Amino acid sequence: MEWKSVSFDWNQIRAFLATVDEGSFSAAARVLGLTQPTLGRQIAALEADLGVTLFERNGRRMDLTKSGLELVEQARAMLQAAGQISLTASGQSQSVEGEVSITATEAMMAYMLPPFVASIRQQAPGIEIRLVASDKVSDLTAREADIAIRHVQPEQPDLTAKKLGQTQARLYGAYRYLDQIGRPDTNQDLAGVDFIGQDHYLRSLRVLSGRGLKLDRANYKMISSSSVTLWEMVKAGLGLAVMTDDVAQRTPGVEAAFPDMEPFDVPVWLVTHRELHSSRRIRMVFDLLAEHFAKDTSYK
């Protein structure tokens, strides 16, 4: 079809692609850290600029129109090209002053990284650290972040990764809650035990049931999309939840529930784009992060 000639707003393109990938305005807004009305206005502005309708509402989902389908691959190519230009420019920067963005899970961001930020502020005060808390696997090639801390090994060939070690995850509860429920074991009926889950709690339920715990959906009385909120509820004595040992060991007043149950291995990878790795300030932060985790006895 024939498109109107316009100057694209990159925020509108990102809003469009996020809606395509997530399937709804609300989910796309969460991914981009926007309010739903703001994202909706960006989509409406893009449609007005192009003179076409890009989405049709189908219940809670936003389905692409024919015009929207035609735009998807072009928009992805444009965003990738823009990101590549930014990567090349950033990779050649040898200044130790400027911003370096780090993304990691929300729990790691809240409980593990503050000491690192304090350290780097002393060692390299000209570097500005921007922390992006996300439980999603961020796309470094799209410049969502300069450095990512991930729990899975990246497969993209243009990424540089260093394994920092691994921690473990297990069920934890506050002393007072475990006192209250009598510290049950894996063979007991757990009908009266409350569990706290994240949005993907059904996967956790299946995994824990596979380890021999007698659980069903009724055990999950509280659900949160935030791992920090989940952990605060555990600390408040509201139930049990899965958390990594590195966080739990820094939290007074909690202990492992079902200590005989085999823990889950959680690898920790430090990742950046190979072009960014040649940037002096990004390389410095990458290396200092690796040193920081190497000194941490909660990682094997």
Image (cartoon, rainbow, N blue to C red):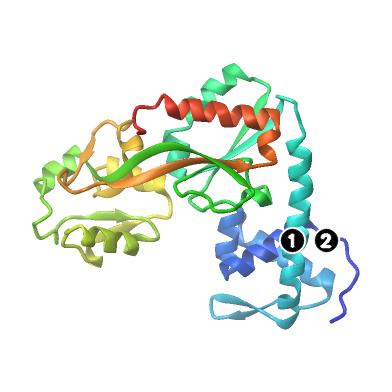
Q: Which residue is mark 1?
A: 12
The CA span between labels 1 and 2 is 7 Å
With 259 as the anchor, is 204 left or right in this view? right
Q: Quadrant of the N terminus?
A: bottom right
Q: Quadrant of the C terminus?
A: top left
Residue 93 occupies quadrant: top right
Along the viewing direction, whichever of 155 and 130 lies nearer the viewer: 155
Q: Is residue 233 visible?
A: no
Amino acid, disc 2: Phe
The residue depicted at 77 percent of the width and 42 percent of the height is: 88
The residue depicted at 28 percent of the width and 49 percent of the height is: 241
The location of residue 113, given as percent across then percent down, is: 48, 32
The location of residue 194, given as percent across then percent down, is: 21, 55
With 99 as the anchor, is 46 left or right in this view? right
- The extreme right residue here reads 5
Tags 1 and 2 touching, CB below 8 Å: yes
Number of residues whose C-alpha sits closer than 10 Å to that of mark 2, classed few (under 14), some (14–19) or many (20 or more): few
The residue depicted at 57 percent of the width and 66 percent of the height is: 22
Q: Which residue is mark 2?
A: 8
- The extreme front residue here reads 157
Q: Is residue 112 above or below residue 242?
A: above
With 169 as the anchor, is 290 left or right in this view? right
The location of residue 16, given as percent across then percent down, is: 69, 65
Q: Under tag 2, what secondary structure?
A: loop
How many numbered marks have been drawn onto this rendered protein structure? Answer: 2
* Residue 283: mark: none
Q: Under tag 1, what secondary structure?
A: helix
Number of residues whose C-alpha sits closer than 10 Å to that of mark 1, classed few (under 14), some (14–19) or many (20 or more): some
